[in-house]
Amino acid sequence: MPEPIAFLGTLDAEEEADFLAALAEALPEESIRPFRTLDAGAREAVRIAIVANPDPAEVARLPNLAWIQSLWAGVERLVRDLGTGAAPIIRLIDPELARTMAEAVLAWTYYLQRDMPAYRRQQEAGTWRQLAYRPPAETHVGLLGFGALGTAAAERLTQAGFRVAAWSRSPKALPPGVAGFSGADGLPSLLAQSDIVVCLLPLTGETRGLLDAARLAATKPGAGLINFGRGPIVATDALLAALDAGQLSHAVLDVFEVEPLPPGSPLWRHPGVTVLPHISGPTTPRSAAAVVAGNVRAYRETGRIPAAVDVGRGY
């Protein structure tokens, strides 16, 4: 049997057990061991680490790592915590994650398109009133980010009849029925035409604070916002001001600058905000383990390290 694979993370005991069981089933030829069970000699031998928000100090005690496999698609915290001297970091590219994220985008787009926040307020006020129906064909959805997640979301939205546009940092080939915008000049144009804006961007130096007061002011009046990307992409104070002014009608937020969202955050109590506990794109142990197993076996057979994160870009 080859050298052990280290498993590091800040999961609770049940989550860790579930991932270890799935990995053992997918990689029966490997010895995958929690970091705490490795002695000094075993830590010296480790070449692969599988991680879920690990303690950077523990990663630093694996001196001969060839690569680090994240169990999450988002790796900006991992890049930040481990620094530029870390071994190559591999983000999880899981087709199941794209499916579940696209499912969530469609579900919460329907939530806004069908005026569910307004009906909730009417229920609380004891008001019986039917609101005018707006069909998907008359609803413009703007996607911020058009990687694997944006592509899957666009497919589900167009199949449901929504009018879809996508913005990315640089021009991309888009499928039929999806309008494209790119670069600094393209973002205001997409925001101005979108009834619902869906953020699926990774957090980088360029996207941090991207949706600030000026860009939120450029949105179509009364638009809805869904943030399934990363919390710091949206400036919280600017978001609350836009909601209070009626520039935005409602915001569905699944990601936050600090998670769990602190009890004192005004987002909990704002009537224009739906707070979700980071559930839009869950990583399932079985599907993640299958992806990791493919990467590990390719490395064992060929020595090839999977495509790594561009540390400069952060994804």
Image: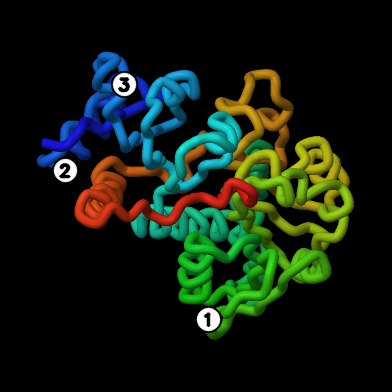
| Residue 307 falls in image quadrant | bottom left
Amino acid type of the residue tagged 1 in the rendering: Pro
Identified at 21% across, 39% down, the residue is 23
Sort mark 3 into few (<14), some (14-19) or many (20+) by Cα contacts within 10 Å. Answer: some
Q: Which residue is mark 3?
A: 35
At horizontal 63% and vertical 51% (from top left) the residue drawn is 313
Describe the element under mark 2 as helix, strand or loop. loop
Residue 147 as seen in the image, left or right of residue 313: left
Position in image of residue 304 (x %, y %):
32, 55
Instruction: Identify which residue, 165 or 141, lies in the foreground.
Output: 165
Compared across the picture, whether 274 is left or right of 189 comes to: left
Looking at the image, which residue is at 11% across and 40% down? 28
Q: Where is 94 relative to 178, above or below?
A: above
Q: Position of residue 167 (x, y in %)?
A: 68, 67
Above or below, 33 against 185 in this view is: above
- The crowding category of the residue bearing disc 2, from other C-alpha atoms within 10 Å (few below 14, some 14 to 19, many at least 20), is some
Q: Nearer the viewer, mark 3 or mark 1?
A: 3
Secondary structure under the numbered disc 3 in the rendered image:
helix
The residue that disc 2 covers is 27
Vertical placement of 178 versus 10: above or below? below
Given the image, on which type of amino acid does mark 2 rest? Answer: Leu
Q: Which residue is mark 1?
A: 175
